[in-house]
Structure formats: structure tokens, C-alpha cells
């Protein structure tokens, strides 16, 4: 093994075919390791280090450190499994190129460029989590299955292979392969999965996630767990675009577990685009916009409208969502809140809302509404409004409209419009008749080929065609179950209990 040293001048230091240690010290030095497993350290000033063949270790400036330096160092590993190590305490800007082999590249505090090259490489912006958070770095994983850990305003390119992109980066590109992109940044970040089946996880604030081609999973927010404490950072108004393929998109999520909870509420107004393929979209809390695009999609507008409580203050989390199914046979769930659901073309299932919560908080009792708008579009659609005063519009096709659903609200006033086609309006099921409180269904466009689904015996129903209650000046038909008004047929008396009622 040879020990080769420079001096305070600019040196050209050449190694041997064996294992060498080459030290540049001061000056603008060029260190060439050649063959063998070499150790090269450039020292101060702007240096060029090339390891050559073998498993080499290259240091930007471990000896003769200049903590205030702004040098420009270039480290090239060459063939072999190399370790390239940036200056931990100085501010040099580095170009680290691993070359062939499974290399480890560690940046410094300056603005660095790290290139993994061929092989399964590990690229990190800092030697430890507490160091090196100053530079705006650019990482290129190259070919192979690489791990890239960014810092501050880093831009990460995974390249070919199944890559993992992590850390505090602002922009990440997965490239070809099945990649995992997870940013911990609290800025407005952009993650692009590109080719392959990718998993994208945004941080806090307003992120943009695009899956690209392949079957991708996109999550607008994430969280950390430190011992017994759960810190949530998944807030922000995110933009998620699944692209082609069968994708799974999450707008963000909330939590209620652990011995202590602290952080943001984890919700905001998200936009989720499924694109082509059979996609699943979850909006979670707050007012989200979900568009399934082409394919047979499943859209969930959001969970129950919850409260986030800190120090006895209650903050309501709204959940007024917009869901658009697009072409294909789609299933849309609005859940709680006042939602708008549009099935688009195809035979769709639309569910307007889940539970209407009454929440007792330290500051009083709050009732949560769920007034939904459901639009079936072309095709034979099923629309279920559930709680609240809902508007259901079937559009073209033979549609089934149920404003009541499995979560009854006897005081709700639902408006049902079947559109063109032979439609079925549901006024009861096997468990009982609907709207036995102060509520009713208003059917706006009753046609001769439409039907009413009802509960019990036809003898329990009666019609009143003597009044004008809704719509134009034409007479309406009131439908009674025993003495309860359960529906009004707007502007028509063309109905027969024996011909148009179907008992279930």
C-alpha cells in the first residue's frame, strides 16, 4: 500500500495498481487512484478525485478542513462499490458520480449534484439527519434500484429501476420502475411517479402528486410516530393525478390514537384525478374534488365530518365534496357533508351521504348537515341520497332514485328527477315506508313509464289531486301512506296506484 501526499500547491497525484492512500491537502489538486481499493482525500480548495477500478473511498475534505470554504469539488468513483463523502461542515458545492457498482454518495452543506450511475446506489444529502440541511441538491439515481434521501429544496430523479425517494425534498421523479416517493417537507412539493407501479406520499402543505403510467398509490399526507406521540403532517390542499393504470389515491387522513395527539388537522381541499383505468379515490375530510376519469372507478368523497380538538377548542372539519365518475361503470360515495356526485356515462352507483352527526363539544352541540346533489348522467344509474335534503337527477337511461337510503331522515325533503328513460322512484323498502315525519319526496318529472317502489299493501296508499303545491300552476299529485304525506308528483295527475306502484 502506497501513501501519497500533496502539499500546499496545486498537485497532480497518481496512485498505483495496488491499494493506495492519496492526500491532497491545500491547493487545487487532482487525485487519481487507478487500480486497487484506494482512499482519496482532496483536502482544502477545489479538487478532482477519481477512484478508478476497485472499491474506493473518496473524501471531499476530511483533512485540512476549511469550514468557511465555498469550493467546487468533483468526486468520481469509477468501477467498483465506492463511498463518496462530501464535506460535512464546509459549504463546498460537490459533484459526486458513483459510476459502475453499488455506491454510497453522501453530500455536504453546499449545492450538490449526486449521480449514482449503474448499480444499486444510496444517495443522501447529509451524513446525519441533523447535518447538511443547507444546500439545494440534485440527485440522479441512474440505473439500478436506488435509494435517494434529499434535504431542503432538493430535486430527486430515481431513473431506471425500483427506487426509493425520501427525506425533505421538494421535487421528485421516480422514473421507470416501481418507485416509492415520500417527502417529509412542509413546503409545496411535486412528486411524479412516471413509469411503473408507484407509491407517492406528500408531506404537509399543498402538494402535487402525479402517478404517471402504471397502477399507482397516491397519498396527499403522511405522519410520523415518535414513541408515544403521534405528530400529523398530512394537511394542505393537494393535487393528485393518477394518470393511466388502476390507481389508488388518498387526499389525506385524520387520526385519533396514541396517548397524546398534536399537530395540524390533516385536512384541506384536495383535487384527485383518476385518469384512465379502474381507479379508487379517497377524498377524506374537507371539501374535495374527485374525478375518476375513464374506467370503472370507486370514489369516496370523505369520512365523517369530525372535530379536531386542542385545549378544549373544537374545529369542525367540513366535507363538501365534488365527485365525477366520468366514463365507465362507477361507484361514488359522498359520505357526510353537502356533496355533488356526477356519475357521467356508464351504469353508475351514487351514494350521497353517510351519518349526520350531532357532536357534543366543550363549546356546545353542533349538528352536521348532509345535503347532496347526485347526477347520474347517461346509463342505467342507481342514486341513493341518504341523510339531508338531497337533489337526485338520473339523466338518460333507466335509473333508480332513492333519496332516503339505509340511513333514514324522516324529515328530509328530497327532490328527484329521473330524466329520459323508464325510472324507478323509491318510497319504501321491506323495512317500512319512507318520509313518515315532516319530510317528503318531490318527483319533478313523472312519466307514464315510471314506477314507484313502496312498502306494505297498496290499500295503505291514497292520492290527492286537488292542490298545486310545487312547480308550475298545474295540479300536483300528493301521495299518502295512511295519513302521512310521503311524496308529491309535480305538475301531473297521470298516476295509478294499481298500475304504477310496486310493493317490495
Image (cartoon, rainbow, N blue to C red):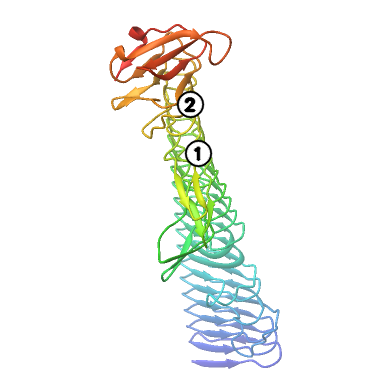
Residue 460 in which image quadrant = top left
Q: Measured from the top left, where is residue 56 in percent x and y?
A: 50, 80
Q: Upstream in the sequence, badge 1 or badge 2?
A: 1
Q: Measured from the top left, where is residue 289 in percent x and y?
A: 55, 41
- Distance, label 1 to label 2, CA atoms, is 13 Å
Instruction: Classify 465 as above or below 437.
Output: above
Instruction: Classify 259 as above or below 381.
Output: below
Per the rendering, the mark at residue 369 is 1
Name the residue nearer the viewer: 132 or 417. Answer: 417
Identify the residue shown where x is 46% and y is 56%.
179
Identify the residue shown where x is 70% and y is 82%.
69
Q: Measured from the top left, where is residue 102 in percent x and y?
A: 46, 70
Per the rendering, the mark at residue 85 is none
Q: Sort mark 2 into few (<14), some (14-19) or many (20+) by Cα contacts within 10 Å.
A: many
Q: Sort mark 1 into few (<14), some (14-19) or many (20+) by Cα contacts within 10 Å.
A: many
Q: Measured from the top left, where is residue 351 in percent x and y?
A: 43, 33
Instruction: Determine whether the residue tagged by mark 2 lies in a helix, strand or loop.
Output: strand
Per the rendering, the mark at residue 413 is 2
Name the residue nearer the viewer: 86 or 474. Answer: 474
Locate residue 329 relative to residue 62 in the image: left or right.
left
Amino acid at each position: 500500500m502506497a501513501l501519497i501526499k500533496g502539499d500546499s500547491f496545486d498537485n497532480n497525484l497518481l496512485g498505483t495498481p495496488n491499494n493506495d492512500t492519496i492526500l491532497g491537502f491545500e491547493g487545487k489538486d487532482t487525485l487519481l487512484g487507478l487500480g486497487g481499493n484506494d482512499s482519496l482525500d482532496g483536502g482544502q480548495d477545489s479538487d478532482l478525485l477519481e477512484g478508478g477500478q476497485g472499491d474506493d473511498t473518496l473524501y471531499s475534505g476530511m483533512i485540512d478542513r476549511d469550514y468557511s470554504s465555498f469550493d467546487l469539488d468533483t468526486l468520481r468513483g469509477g468501477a467498483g462499490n465506492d463511498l463518496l463523502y462530501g464535506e460535512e461542515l464546509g459549504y463546498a458545492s460537490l459533484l459526486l458520480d458513483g459510476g459502475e457498482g453499488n455506491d454510497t454518495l453522501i453530500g455536504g452543506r453546499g449545492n450538490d449534484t449526486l449521480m449514482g450511475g449503474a448499480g444499486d446506489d444510496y444517495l443522501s444529502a447529509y451524513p446525519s439527519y441533523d447535518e447538511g440541511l443547507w444546500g439545494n441538491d440534485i440527485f440522479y439515481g441512474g440505473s439500478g434500484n436506488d435509494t435517494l434521501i434529499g434535504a431542503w429544496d432538493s430535486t430527486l430523479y430515481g431513473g431506471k429501476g425500483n427506487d426509493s425517494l425520501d427525506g425533505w425534498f421538494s421535487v421528485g421523479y421516480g422514473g421507470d420502475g416501481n418507485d416509492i416517493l415520500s417527502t417529509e417537507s412542509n413546503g409545496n412539493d411535486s412528486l411524479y411517479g412516471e413509469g411503473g407501479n408507484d407509491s407517492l406520499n406528500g408531506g404537509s402543505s399543498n402538494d402535487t402528486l402525479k402517478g404517471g403510467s402504471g397502477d399507482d398509490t397516491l397519498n396527499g399526507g403522511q405522519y410520523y410516530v415518535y414513541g408515544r406521540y403521534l405528530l400529523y403532517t398530512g394537511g394542505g390542499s393537494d393535487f393528485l393525478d393518477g394518470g393511466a393504470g388502476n390507481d389508488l389515491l388518498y387526499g389525506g387522513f385524520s387520526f385519533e390514537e396514541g396517548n397524546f395527539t398534536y399537530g395540524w388537522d390533516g385536512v384541506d381541499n384536495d383535487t384527485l384525478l383518476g385518469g384512465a383505468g379502474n381507479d379508487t379515490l379517497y377524498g377524506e375530510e374537507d371539501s374535495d374534488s374527485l374525478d375518476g376519469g375513464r374506467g370503472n372507478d370507486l370514489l369516496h368523497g370523505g369520512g365523517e365530518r369530525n372535530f379536531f380538538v386542542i385545549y378544549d377548542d373544537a374545529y369542525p372539519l367540513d366535507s363538501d365534496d365534488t365527485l365525477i365518475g366520468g366514463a365507465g361503470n362507477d361507484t361514488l360515495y359522498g359520505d357526510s357533508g353537502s356533496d355533488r356526485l356526477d356519475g357521467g356515462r356508464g351504469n353508475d352507483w351514487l351514494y350521497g351521504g353517510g351519518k349526520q352527526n350531532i357532536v357534543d363539544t366543550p363549546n356546545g352541540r353542533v349538528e352536521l348537515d348532509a345535503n347532496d346533489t347526485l347526477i347520474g348522467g347517461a346509463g342505467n344509474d342507481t342514486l341513493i341520497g341518504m341523510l339531508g335534503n338531497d337533489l337526485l337527477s338520473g339523466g338518460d337511461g333507466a335509473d333508480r332514485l332513492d333519496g332516503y337510503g339505509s340511513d333514514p331522515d324522516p324529515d328530509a325533503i328530497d327532490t328527484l328527477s329521473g330524466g329520459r328513460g323508464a325510472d324507478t322512484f323509491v318510497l319504501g323498502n321491506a323495512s317500512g315506508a319512507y318520509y313518515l315525519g315532516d319530510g317528503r319526496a318531490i318527483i319533478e318529472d313523472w312519466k307514464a313509464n315510471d314506477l314507484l317502489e313502496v312498502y306494505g299493501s297498496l290499500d295503505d296508499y291514497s292520492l290527492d289531486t286537488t292542490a298545486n303545491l310545487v312547480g308550475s300552476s298545474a295540479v300536483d299529485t300528493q301521495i299518502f301512506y295512511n295519513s302521512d304525506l310521503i311524496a308529491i308528483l309535480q305538475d301531473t295527475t297521470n298516476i295509478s296506484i294499481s298500475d304504477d306502484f310496486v310493493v317490495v
